[in-house]
Image (tube, rainbow, N blue to C red):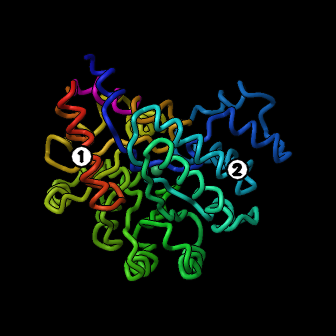
Amino acid sequence: MTTKDFIAKIPKADLHVHLEGTMEPELIFRLAKRNHIALPYPDLSHLKAAYKFDHLADFLSVYYQGTKVIRSSRDFYDITLAYLQRAATENTLHADIFIDPQAHLDKGITLAMMLDGVLPAVEESRKKYGISTGLILCFLRHRPLEESIQILQSIGPLQAHFAAVGLAAKELGHPPKDFTRLYEMAGKMGLRRTAHAGEEGPADYVRQAVELLRVDRIDHGNSIVEDPGLMQRVKDAQIPLTLCPLSNLHLQVIEDMKAHPADRLLRAGLKVTINSDDPSYFGGYMNANLLAVSEAFDWGQDQIIQVMRNSFDAAYTSPERKVEMHQILTDFINNI
Ligand SMILES: [Zn+2]
């Protein structure tokens, strides 16, 4: 079996995927039409051409343009189902999905409305495709801290649908330490904690996420390689890193896939996972991401299996589901 076939067939988990980042251009156009929203692109080819970015801020402006077309629970249902259907074709067993309430507040869309669409799609995918999901209540770091705190404070019974809190969007100038109060509150509420850190920010942002936000997972974390002491600490604590190779390449966090820290971190014994981030924007879902790093570092089956085992361990799901996913992987390995 070629590495490409092996990657396509291996049971996998995607732990770092933003719901709106799964919207393919065709879906954006369909929702724009349904909701009578004018897009600044005359047709699909122009929108596809806009999917070329120089850096994170550039990408985010196109990304937020895409989120403007989302107006109803039905839209969230369609987006969630489209992603999970696609993930199922890649033998994805589990997905942890970021849900950003602040991205839709200005349109009058509440978190409850979002979940009215997301939850039925999640349930349908569980039954049809056997995919489990963890939802991450993700805050936007360029928005005011008080807004995040207010959302978390007023979440009420909707908390039951979330496994964790997250922190995303423009990193530089918005260090993790600014969100210490929010994360303290989330911890007291019994929510798990992850945060984007060290994607475009320095290793110190990763340190802040670990020490001040007390995260149990780090999203990206690339710049940890600049700080050997911190690397050792994250290794000792086995805090998983949700790396996103194609995202890093497209946003020019790295110049070349060979410069990605995935291989170095895996060799050093850190709990490395490979994920898709915003797959429709960055040229690929899980298979493409795994293939890109495998080709760059000549990974064989052993490394790919290790990364998947790490993902199952790190997934925001029950211990029973983790055991089940490991067993599915073991059965797969025994049958090849
Ligand atoms: Zn991300």
Dot 1 or dot 2: first in sequence order is: 2
Residue 141 visible in rendering:
no
Element assignment for label 2:
helix
Residue 165 visible in rendering:
yes
- Residue 218 x, y percent position in the rendering: 33, 57
- Magenta stretch: residue 292 in it? yes
- Residue 271 x, y percent position in the rendering: 22, 50
The quadrant of the rendering that contains the N terminus is top left
- Among the 4 quarters of the image, the one containing residue 79: top right
Q: Give the range drawn in magenta.
A: 288-299
Relative to the observer, which residue lies in front, 18 or 326? 326
Vertical position of residue 307 compared to residue 296: above or below? below
Left or right placement of residue 307 versus residue 14 in this view: left
Left or right placement of residue 232 versus residue 24 in this view: left
- Residue 12 x, y percent position in the rendering: 34, 40
Element assignment for label 1:
helix
- Residue 188 x, y percent position in the rendering: 38, 83
Q: Which amino acid does label 1 sit on?
A: His
Mark in the foreground, 1 or 2:
1
- Magenta stretch: residue 173 in it? no
The residue at which mark 1 appears reads as 326
The residue at which mark 2 appears reads as 75
- Among the 4 quarters of the image, the one containing residue 93: top left
- Residue at the spot 19% in from the left edge and 34% down from the top edge: 303
